[in-house]
Amino acid sequence: MALASRNVEWTIALLGGLRARHAEREVTRFRTHKTAVLLAYLAFYRSRPHPRDALIDLLWGEGTPEAGRQSLSKAIS
């Protein structure tokens, strides 16, 4: 699955382990497991909008809303 952003193409592989590739650079390790899950989810469902609250509920629903917002912000930075 190829994703283009700002004229830079990334390829996201979901099977056989999550991998993100751009030119010669391949990323296979992510800051946290939930960061990797977030990337996989957004790549797989790339054609639909993703409200922040829905992503927070999906990945950080066990905590407070504020903690979830902070975690999402950190994951996408």
Image (tube, rainbow, N blue to C red):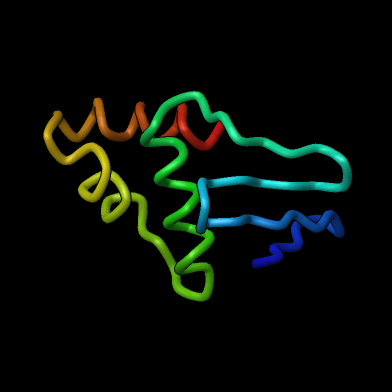
Count of numbered badges drawn on the protein: 0
**Residue 11 in the figure: left or right of residue 57:** right
| Nearest the eye: 60 or 25 | 25
As drawn, 25 above or below 54: above
Q: Residue furthest bottom?
A: 47
Examine the rendered structure and indicate whether residue 22 appears above or below residue 74. below
Q: Quadrant of the N terminus?
A: bottom right
In percent of the image, x 52 and y 75: which residue is there? 47
Q: Residue furthest front?
A: 16
Name which quarter of the figure residue 26 lies in: top right
Q: Position of residue 5 (x, y in %)?
A: 75, 57
Could you tell me which residue is drawn at 74 percent across and 47 percent down? 21
Q: Residue at x 53, y 60 (%)?
A: 43
What x and y, as percent, mark residue 49?
Answer: 44, 68
Question: Residue at point 53% right, 46% down?
Answer: 18
- Which x, y percent locates residue 9? 80, 58
Q: Going by the image, does 35 lie left or right of 25?
A: left
Quarter placement of the C terminus: top right
User: Residue 60, percent across and down?
Assistant: 23, 37
Q: Is residue 7 left or right of residue 50?
A: right
